[in-house]
Every structure is written in C-alpha cells, then in structure tokens.
Image: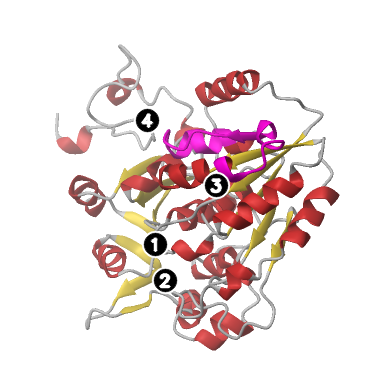
C-alpha cells in the first residue's frame, strides 16, 4: 500500500496514533463518528494569551465564528494561567498552552484563519509564523513593529495609539471592536464559560454547608484585582463601610470574593466589620484556584466589583454587576443589560491606565458608596 492509498479521515476525533473506537479501523472502514458533526472543516487558530479578563471576554467571539463557519475546528492558544478559564468550553475543539511543544505543533498545521487579538511582540511574531491563508488581528512588520494584519483591525490599532479616541471619543465595546478586527458579525453574544458536573455538585454541597437561603439576596464583594493594575480596587475601609451598611438589611447576605492575593485583605475586612454584622458575611476560600472562585461567585445574585477579572467572571456567569471605573475605560465593557457602571465625574485624569497614581487615587476615593448601596437595595432577585 502506498501513502496515497491511505484514507486519512478529516474527523476531529482521529489522531493517527490509535483507533478512535476499540477495534474500529477508520482507515479501512471509514469514519465511525458522525462525520457531519465532527468534520474538521475550516481550521481557525485564535491567539488570545493575556490578560485573564481579556481572555474570558474574548470567548464572546465564539458564537459569531460558529455562525460564520458552522463546519469548523477552533484551536485556541493561551497562557498557562488562563487555561482554566477555557476549560470545558464546548466550542473550543483544541486548547493549546503557550509553550514550545504547542508552538511546534501549531506551526505544522495548515489553517484557513489565524485570529490574533493580542498586541504583544511575541503573540504577533507567532502569528507571523503560522501557516494560514488569512491572518486577522495583529502581526509584526519587518521592523518588528506591531501592525494591523487586515483592514478590519485598523480601528482597534488606532485606538491603542490615540488617547483622545480611547479615553474620550470611543463608545464601542471591546468585543464589538474585536468582531470587526476578525471580520465577524457583532450580535452582543455572551461570554462562554461552563461548569462541569463535578463543579455543579461542589456548588450544591457548598450551599448546604453555608445553609443557603433562596429567599435571601446574596451580594458578592469582589475585593481585589490584578497585581498588574493594583489601583482597580476599593480600600479596605470602603469595603468595611459598605458591608456595615448593607449588613443592616435582613434580606441580604454578604459574600467576600477574591483570589489568593486577596487572602490577607479579606481577613482584614472581616475583622473590621461591626460585630452585629459579621454573622451575615461569608468569607469564601481564596486559595482554591480560578474555577473554585467561579463556583463561589455563582452563589451570588449581584456582584460589586472593580474592572477586573472578577467583573468579567460575574458577566460570564450572568450576574447583575455594579462596577466602578477609574483608570480603565467603561465604554469598552458590555454588561448585557445586567448592571450599572459607576464612572468618576469631573476627573480629567480618568481614565489613564497608569499602574501608579500621581494624584492619591482620587478616582477610588470618590466612589459613591451611597449609590452602590441604593442600587443594591433596588435590585430585585430573579
């Protein structure tokens, strides 16, 4: 038999290493799977490496890709710390972690499309290396400069280089802009994040542990943010003040949320709240990872947060979100009609995207806690 005589299935299940099904020879008897559902079709590589909130936000392009290319195989390349956000995503066929082995494999696949959302040297350099008929988003030019890979990405490129446009004039969400860059129809599709069966069981057990009462409103406080932009969070004092006020309401339970870096912070917050309120505060574990953090957030009806991964997770879980903005751009965030944005008024320095504030964090100091309290009390569960 010659190589040309081999009937290599164009099926998502077939690897060429072993049979997809025991004692079923796809090479001799044809594909054993539903070839309509599992046909490789159009091969698309999405490069979305960082940051965590952006990776989760970018899952909102997947429904549009599937509308445009119903018969397709979607490959997604991301950093290791973002992998858990994409776990159990039914639309992503193959998830690759940014390492040399993954890059070696991807270089050897012939793609119809590569869609690179990241404006970083290494993401753009790798997009250049990919064998794809069409490249969308961003790449490097011969001088090593990041440039748009196609006409649709020009607006996204310009907005990153024009503070007036980004901070003042733009009214489009980041997902809207990304759809244009990738030549997709923007229909305000939701983020895609799915729990598996084990996680659903874990949440049911945790609800039993905390004696979850469905007649109460569970108010999540996402107390932290990325260490890359540490000034996206309220002060400990502000959190304590908010908890003390909301804790007066008989129908509310306060849920402290956060990551490993927020462990000490949440302990300090809990220690400082009034004694007559502490029994109404649930301090969720902060050291169990992203997926467990999402499980704890899912018990909440409403989440109060800064513009952070916690905000994006709350959006993905379809929670009502009250989010404050200071250094980042509120227009770029889509809340899907489930929330309120608090925007600092009269601050010429906001937004700024600075990691260090030269003005004593005025945008945080002027967060309207009374408005947050009012909006929370006006919120109707269900």
- Mark 3 — residue? 70
Q: Label 1 crowding class (10 Å Cα cut-off): few <14, some 14-19, many 20+? A: few
Q: Do the residues under discs 4 and 2 have CB atoms within 8 angstroms? A: no
In front of the other: label 1 or label 4?
A: 1
- Mark 2 — residue? 355
Q: Do the residues under discs 2 and 1 have CB atoms within 8 angstroms? A: yes
Q: Do the residues under discs 1 and 3 have CB atoms within 8 angstroms? A: no
Q: Which part of the image, by quadrant, shows the C terminus?
A: top right
- Residue 115 vertical placement versus 102 (above, below): below
Q: Residue at x 55, y 65 (%)?
A: 179
Q: Nearer the viewer, residue 83 or 107?
A: 83
In front of the other: label 2 or label 3?
A: 2
Whole-Å distance between the Cαs marked 2 and 1? Answer: 7 Å
Q: Which part of the image, by quadrant, shows the N terminus?
A: top left
Residue 328 at x, y percent in the picture: 54, 70
Label 3 element class: loop
Q: Which residue is drawn at 34% across and 33% down?
A: 9
Q: Is residue 342 magenta?
A: no
Mark 4 / mark 2, whichever is N-terminal: 4
Instruction: Magenta stretch: give its range.
Output: 271-296
Mark 2 / mark 3, whichever is N-terminal: 3
Whole-Å distance between the Cαs marked 2 and 3? Answer: 42 Å
Residue 306 at x, y percent in the picture: 58, 59
- Residue 159 vertical placement versus 229 (above, below): below
Determine the residue located farthest toward the left in the rendered image.
Answer: 2
Q: Do the residues under discs 4 and 3 have CB atoms within 8 angstroms? A: no
- Total marks placed: 4
Mark 1 / mark 3, whichever is N-terminal: 3
């Amino acid at each position: 038999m010659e190589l040309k005589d081999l009937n290599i299935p164009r099926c998502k299940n077939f690897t060429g290493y072993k049979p997809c099904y025991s004692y079923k020879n796809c090479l001799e008897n044809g594909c054993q799977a539903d070839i309509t559902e599992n046909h490789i079709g159009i091969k698309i590589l999405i490069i979305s490496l960082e940051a965590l909130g952006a990776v989760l936000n970018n899952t909102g392009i997947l429904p549009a890709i599937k509308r445009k290319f119903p018969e397709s195989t979607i490959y997604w390349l991301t950093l290791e710390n973002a992998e858990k956000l994409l776990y159990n995503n039914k639309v992503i066929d193959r998830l690759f972690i940014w390492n040399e082995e993954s890059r070696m494999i991807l270089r050897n696949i012939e793609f119809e499309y590569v869609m690179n959302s990241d404006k970083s040297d290494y993401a753009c350099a790798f997009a250049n290396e990919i064998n794809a008929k069409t490249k969308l988003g961003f790449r490097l030019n011969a001088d090593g400069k990041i440039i748009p890979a196609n006409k649709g990405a020009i607006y996204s490129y310009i907005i990153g280089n024009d503070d007036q446009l980004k901070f003042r004039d733009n009214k489009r969400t980041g997902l809207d802009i990304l759809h244009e860059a990738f030549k997709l129809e923007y229909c305000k599709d939701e983020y895609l994040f799915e729990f598996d069966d084990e996680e659903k069981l874990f949440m049911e057990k945790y609800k039993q542990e905390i004696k979850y009462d469905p007649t109460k409103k569970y108010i999540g406080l996402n107390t932290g943010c990325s260490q890359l932009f540490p000034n996206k969070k309220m002060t400990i004092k502000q959190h304590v003040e908010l908890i003390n006020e909301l804790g007066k309401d008989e129908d509310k339970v306060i849920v402290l949320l956060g990551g490993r870096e927020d462990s000490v912070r949440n302990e300090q917050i809990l220690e400082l709240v009034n004694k007559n309120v502490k029994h109404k505060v649930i301090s969720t574990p902060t050291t169990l990872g992203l997926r467990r953090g999402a499980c704890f957030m899912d018990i909440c009806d409403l989440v109060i947060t800064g513009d952070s991964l916690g905000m994006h997770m709350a959006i993905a879980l379809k929670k009502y979100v009250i989010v404050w903005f200071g250094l980042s751009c509120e227009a770029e965030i889509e809340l899907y009609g489930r929330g309120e944005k608090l925007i600092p008024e009269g601050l010429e320095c906001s937004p700024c995207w600075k990691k260090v504030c030269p003005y004593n964090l005025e945008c945080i100091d002027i967060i309207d806690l009374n408005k947050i309290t009012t909006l929370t009390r006006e919120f109707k569960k269900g």
